[in-house]
Amino acid sequence: EIVLTQSPATLSLSPGERATLSCRASQSVSRYLAWYQQKPGQAPRLLIYDASNRATGIPARFSGSGSGTDFTLTISSLEPEDFAVYYCQQRDNWPLTFGAGTKVEI
Amino acid sequence: EVQLVESGGGLVKPGGSLRLSCAASGFTFTNFPMNWVRQAPGKGLEWVSSIDTSGSFVYYAGSVKGRFTISRDIAKKSLYLQLTSLRAEDTAVYYCAKGMTSVTTNAFDIWGQGTFVAVSS
């Protein structure tokens, strides 16, 4: 099973600041990594798929990069609505797995 | 509008069974694999099961294999998850999620609102 390790667990930032979230895989997942955003009481929302492709309707301030085992989600300038939990997910191998999440808080 | 609506959750005793349903609308149901993902209270996301476009190939997390069964009904545009031999650790919100492309291993681009399953005596 591919383990995804997200860091940091919590990121404390202010609106307007840049957020950099990391996801490291225990073995290569090529570029088959996605990022999701989840707000309290809501279902997750797909942000990025295949490492760097923004999903439909996702603002340009969200960007993804990486390949192999190391991936990054960057939010260039935090908006108030961006404070949430972010998960990475790999689709390279069964079982599909998620990271434990990074909480971006004010 | 593309939409997934889950139903069937509730309170069940350990060892009991439950059937979750997910009604799909707004997209061609037969073209996409479908998935179940769960989230225990206060915890992260856990992939549970996937089914390919035809329903011929199914995949399960080790924690549910042999106890849960995924299926789909093309005519009813619905996805199902039969849960048996339920344990306290199966307590979670269960989300139905649409695969992004026709490939079975996928990102999940559309999610339902979730249905809560509580396993307790």
Image (tube, coloured by chain):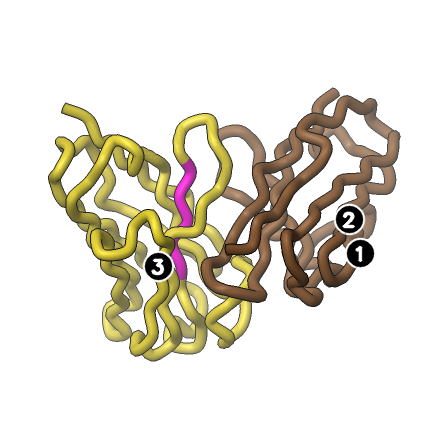
Chain colours: A brown, B yellow
Which residues lie in the magenta part?
B35-39
Quote the CA–CA distance across marks 3 and 1: 29 Å
Q: Position of residue B52 (x, y in %)?
A: 38, 73
- Residue B9: mark in rendering: none
**Residue, x 26% and y 55% (percent of image)?**
B81
**Chain of the residue that carries numbered disc 1 in the rendered image:** A
Mark 1 or mark 2: name the one nearer the start of the chain.
1
Which of the two marks, 3 or 1, is nearer to us in this view? 3
**Chain of the residue that carries numbered disc 2 in the rendered image:** A
Quarter holding the C terminus of chain B is top left
Q: Position of residue A91 (x, y in %)?
A: 56, 62
* Amino acid marked by disc 3: Tyr
- Residue A65: mark in rendering: 1
Q: Are marks 1 and 2 in contact (CB under 8 Å)?
A: yes
Q: Are marks 3 and 2 in contact (CB under 8 Å)?
A: no
Quote the CA–CA distance across marks 3 and 2: 28 Å
From the viewer's perspective, tell me whether residue B116 is left or right of residue A14: left
**Residue, x 26% and y 46% (percent of image)?**
B7
From the viewer's perspective, tell me whether residue B106 is left or right of residue B116: right
* Secondary element at image label 1: strand
* Secondary element at image label 2: strand
- Local crowd at mark 1 within 10 Å, few (<14), some, or many (≥20)? some
Query: Where is mark 3, residue-wise?
Result: B60
* Amino acid marked by disc 1: Ser
